[in-house]
Amino acid sequence: MADFPTTRQEQILGWLSESPSLSIDELVGRLGVSVMTIHRDLDQLARAGQVEKVHGGVIRADSRTRRTRALQVCRLCDAPVSERTQVIIQTAAAEPVYACCPHCGILLAVDTVQPTSILAKDFIYGRMVNAWTAYYLLNSSITLCCQPSYLCFSSRDDALNFQKGFGGQIATFDEARTQLEAEHHRGCDGPHMHSMGD
Ligand SMILES: [Zn+2]
Ligand SMILES: [Zn+2]
């Protein structure tokens, strides 16, 4: 009856929509399959973000789990956020805001009320670094996301070495922000940003 994994998994999800949790024993009894089979089904459902395994049983994945598993979208341009270039802006009040790359990240940071931290991905090492103290290589020949391209480096030396090979100008966070704002004021095709005043 419940021989097929997909049928069983649908059945499990169906039961979970009626009760928030189920024990492994209960599932073994209801489905008439082995404990191992149940674990395999639950593992697959958990990987898909549909359930959470807990000791001896399973619970519905809450909306928070599902949200963090879903692909983030850039708050500014709606592009899917790649881990390679992502920027995360954290505020005390709200959920973190994701940007696809430093280009959007710096523009968003200007518009964010009292960010507590801004993290950007170091272009070489792939670590999240403090965006305020990082260096940016603007308009180099490497474009991974938005144009003009902004690459982030935690060290000025790394940025300089990249500049030798790929051109562009090096800027601090503030300099990059000033440049971006100026660009967006000269007729932009992107979303309109507020002026910070003259
Ligand atoms: Zn973006
Ligand atoms: Zn981008």
Image: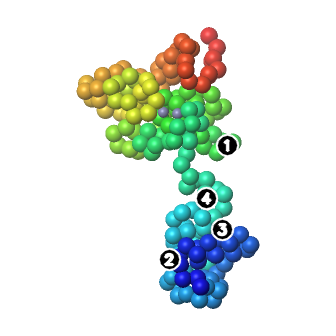
Mark nearest the camera among 1 and 2 is 2
- Note whether residue 34 is visible: yes
Going from N to C along the chain, the mark reached first, 3 or 2, is: 2
Q: Nearer the viewer, residue 117 or 162?
A: 162
Q: Is residue 118 visible?
A: no
What kind of element bears circle 2?
helix
The residue that disc 2 covers is 40
Instruction: Report the Cα–Cα distance between label 1 and label 3.
Output: 25 Å
Q: Are marks 2 and 4 in contact (CB under 8 Å)?
A: no
Which disc number belongs to residue 60? 3
* Residue indicated by mark 1: 94
Residue mark closest to the camera, 1 vs 3: 3
Circle number at residue 19: none
Query: Crowding at label 2, few (<14), some or many (≥20) Cα neighbours within 10 Å?
Result: few
**Is the Cβ of the residue at disc 3 closer than 8 Å to that at disc 2?**
no
Query: Which is more N-terminal, label 4 or label 2?
Result: 2
Residue ranking furthest to the front: 1
- Quadrant for the N terminus in the image: bottom right
Q: Amino acid at mark 4?
A: Thr
Q: Amino acid at mark 2?
A: Arg
Query: Which amino acid type is marked by label 1?
Result: Ala
Give the vertical position of 158 relative to 22 (above or below). Answer: above
Q: Position of residue 64 (x, y in %)?
A: 64, 56
* Amino acid at the residue labelled 3: Arg
Mark closer to the chain start, 1 or 4? 4
* Lower position in the chain sequence, tag 3 or tag 4: 3
Residue carrying label 4: 65
Q: Position of residue 136 (x, y in %)?
A: 41, 28
Tell me if 196 is positioned left or right of 183 in this view.
right
Query: Which residue is farthest right?
Result: 18
- Label 3: which secondary element: strand
Q: Residue at x 50, y 42 (%)?
A: 81
